[in-house]
Image: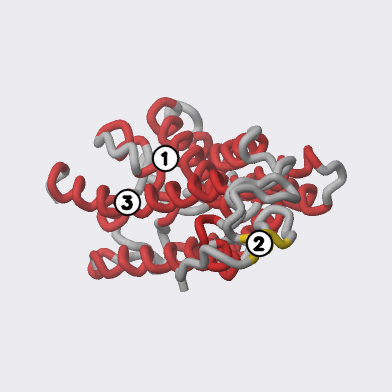
Amino acid sequence: MFKRQPTGSIACPSCRKLVAMEKKKCPHCGRRNPGMWGYARTFQRLGADLGFIEIATWGCIGLYLISLLMDIPGIHGTGMDILSPSPVSNLLLGSTGSIPVFLAGRWWTVLSSGWLHGSLIHIAFNVAWIRHLVPGVAQIYGGARLVVIYTASAIAGSLITSVAGQYLNGLPGIFHGASFSVGASGAIFGLFGALVAYGQVVKGSAIAQQAKIYAIVLFLFGFVFPNTDNWGHLGGFIGGYLAASSPWLTSRYREGHRHLIAAILCLLATALSFPVSVVHALFFLGY
């Protein structure tokens, strides 16, 4: 699947016009390294999202199953919370919040927590939204920038709810941050933010207007349903909007190979955060 093809022709990943694989710059749009080190065809076979839908879907599902199997007697919950993993399992794998970040110094959990979930319905809801939103964001920004925006949104949501949990818990309950937090909803709200940012570039965009309405409605629902991480949602939306509006990630310009490198680094850092969480918890927290 990852066979290298250093010669021949390829459709430029940015402008889709035919270019020689060995060219250092696309003669049509100026994109550097259009052949992507000889792996352009491989990346293009993954689709516009570079396979991120499947990575996110099966990554979340796999980690959810692992969290259940790590402590089967600790599985609990009924109704909306059915099949909730043990809090210890999610802590071991990398749940975030004021306690992990500020008391235990587990700062990398702002990466890991967005791939963990607290119940069957929680993960089903989030995976459905990921599969619904990712294709549109990938079509607009490109697969690599999608991954960077998603990761930045997850970090922003986790960080803001952790800060709120540490410093704002004197406010009424619905304005509390999280002592412990898991879930992809911060990153999902970040995708909404990216689509709204696109609407600032393309005035009157129907997809941006729809994203804005969805974000508002879902955010308001957070004040109705208990145990909803409203700060995580707000932080994720702001993170996604700001990331997608930045000069480096904005949809005004074509995606380049540097975005791909950044996306790979985001995925590697996220993958590394889970074993780091487990090792730290076992050896330094005494689990």
Where disc 3 sits, the SS reads: helix
The answer to whether any part of residue 91 appears in the image is yes
Where disc 1 sits, the SS reads: loop
Neighbours of disc 1 within 10 Å: few (<14), some (14-19), many (20+): many
Question: Which residue does the numbered mark 3 point to in the structure image?
Answer: 272
Are the residues at dot 1 and dot 2 in contact (C-beta closer than 8 Å)?
Answer: no
Q: Is residue 221 left or right of residue 52?
A: right
Sequence-wise, the earlier of marks 2 and 3 is 2
Q: Amino acid at mark 3?
A: Leu
Give the image location of residue 26, x and y in percent: 68, 50
Give the image location of residue 107, x and y in percent: 33, 37
Kindly identify the residue that appears in the image at 48 percent across and 64 percent down: 55
Give the image location of residue 216, x and y in percent: 70, 45
Q: Is residue 167 above or below residue 135?
A: above
Kindly identify the residue that appears in the image at 48 percent across and 37 percent down: 173
Give the image location of residue 61, x and y in percent: 43, 67
Are the residues at dot 2 and dot 3 in contact (C-beta closer than 8 Å)?
Answer: no
Where disc 2 sits, the SS reads: helix
Q: Is residue 250 left or right of residue 55?
A: right
Q: Amino acid at mark 2?
A: Pro
Q: Amino acid at mark 1?
A: Ala
Instruction: Mark 1 vs mark 3: give the one in front.
Output: 3
Viewer-proximal residue among 18 and 97: 18
Using the image, tell me which numbered label, if any, was put on residue 12: none
Using the image, tell me which numbered label, if any, was put on residue 135: 2
Sequence-wise, the earlier of marks 1 and 3 is 1
Using the image, tell me which numbered label, if any, was put on residue 178: 1
